Image: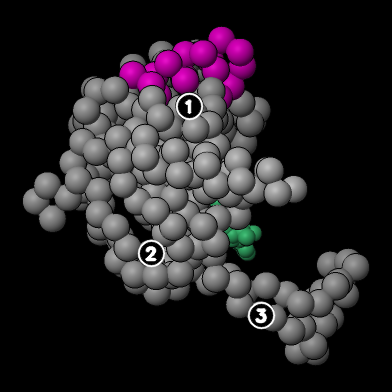
Amino acid sequence: MTNVDVKVENVTMQFRLSNEKVDNLKEYFVRVLKKEMRYSNFCALDSVSFEIKRGERIGIIGHNGAGKSTLLKIISGVMKPTQGKVQVNGAVAPLLELGAGFDPDFSGAENIYLNGAILGKSKEYLDNKFDEIVEFSELGHFIHSPVKNYSSGMRAKLGFSIATQIDPDILIVDEILGVGDEQFKIKSSEKMKEMMESGKTVIIVSHSINNIRTLTDIVIWLEKGTIRGIGDTQSICDCYMNEMRKVKEKS
Ligand SMILES: Nc1ncnc2c1ncn2[C@@H]1O[C@H](COP(=O)(O)OP(=O)(O)OP(=O)(O)O)[C@@H](O)[C@H]1O
């Protein structure tokens, strides 16, 4: 693993789906208790393996439901695969569900320490970064209010600021969308692009082939949970676009 930042080995993710149509929550619980619910397994990722070396910028593309976000969540540690394993070498900044890990009863300030610790940073490190994180978040004195009183935009701003200001080794991005209000959207998408161009290891999912072409060097094309193609960005994007064109012509 010396110069490998992420190693994904035979990762399979199965979800259990209900086959029954249930009209309301009460009926659902009654049927669960009576053991009347029937389920089937759905395979969102099927034996996926690849390695990402330090400093590589990887794009993940594929149709809706191909398994892209599931793969990002597994690499970030948000989700455990049903089978297989993922080894990650370095501090990860997952720009996925921003603020999802916050404790709502703690203040924004306390959540900086909580979230920072989850991202592998010491108290001393966070003491030094604290002012920068608060300044970038634009939360001002609200940083001392409990997070449960924040709007979703305020939570996302704080989550984004923590993840990007702690100098992560590996950046995981699900679509380069700006977060928060218009002004913060511009600032956050510029920050993401700046980090992507600064030699960090980057894994990005995007439906924008233009973004993938300009921001990544290697592309993984996922289709129905398996790797359809992996290789240099321009040739994999060309194959993907050709296929999209053929499908459009047929329909
Ligand atoms: N928690 C879950 N429970 C059940 N099925 C799920 C769950 N999460 C994802 N799936 C299913 O797994 C498949 C892959 O989902 P995923 O979100 O990874 O796709 P995606 O490639 O990111 O799609 P999109 O481009 O539409 O965002 C989909 O069919 C989705 O319905």
Question: Residue shown at 30%/35% (left/top)?
Answer: 217
Q: Rate crowding at label 3 as few (under 14), some (14 to 19) or many (20 or more) other CA atoms within 10 Å.
A: few
Question: Residue shown at 53%/31% (left/top)?
Answer: 208
The quarter holding residue 214 reads top left
Horizontal relation, residue 215 to residue 27: left or right = left
Q: Rate crowding at label 2 as few (under 14), some (14 to 19) or many (20 or more) other CA atoms within 10 Å.
A: some
Horizontal relation, residue 234 to residue 124: left or right = right
Instruction: Measure the alpha-carbon separation of dots 1 and 3.
Output: 38 Å
Where is residue 134 shown, x and y percent of the image?
A: 41, 19
Query: Foreground residue, 47 or 141?
Result: 47
Q: Which residue is mark 3?
A: 40
Q: Main secondary structure of the magenta part?
A: helix
- Residue type, numbered disc 3: Ser
Question: Residue shown at 37%/35% (left/top)?
Answer: 234
Q: Secondary structure at mark 1?
A: helix
User: Where is 54 relative to 131, above or below?
Assistant: below
- Numbered range of the magenta stretch: 179-194
The quarter holding residue 145 reads top right
Does residue 196 appear in the picture of this structure? yes
Instruction: Measure the alpha-carbon separation of dots 3 and 2.
Output: 21 Å
Q: Earlier in the sequence, mark 3 or mark 2?
A: 3
| Mark number, residue 210 | 1
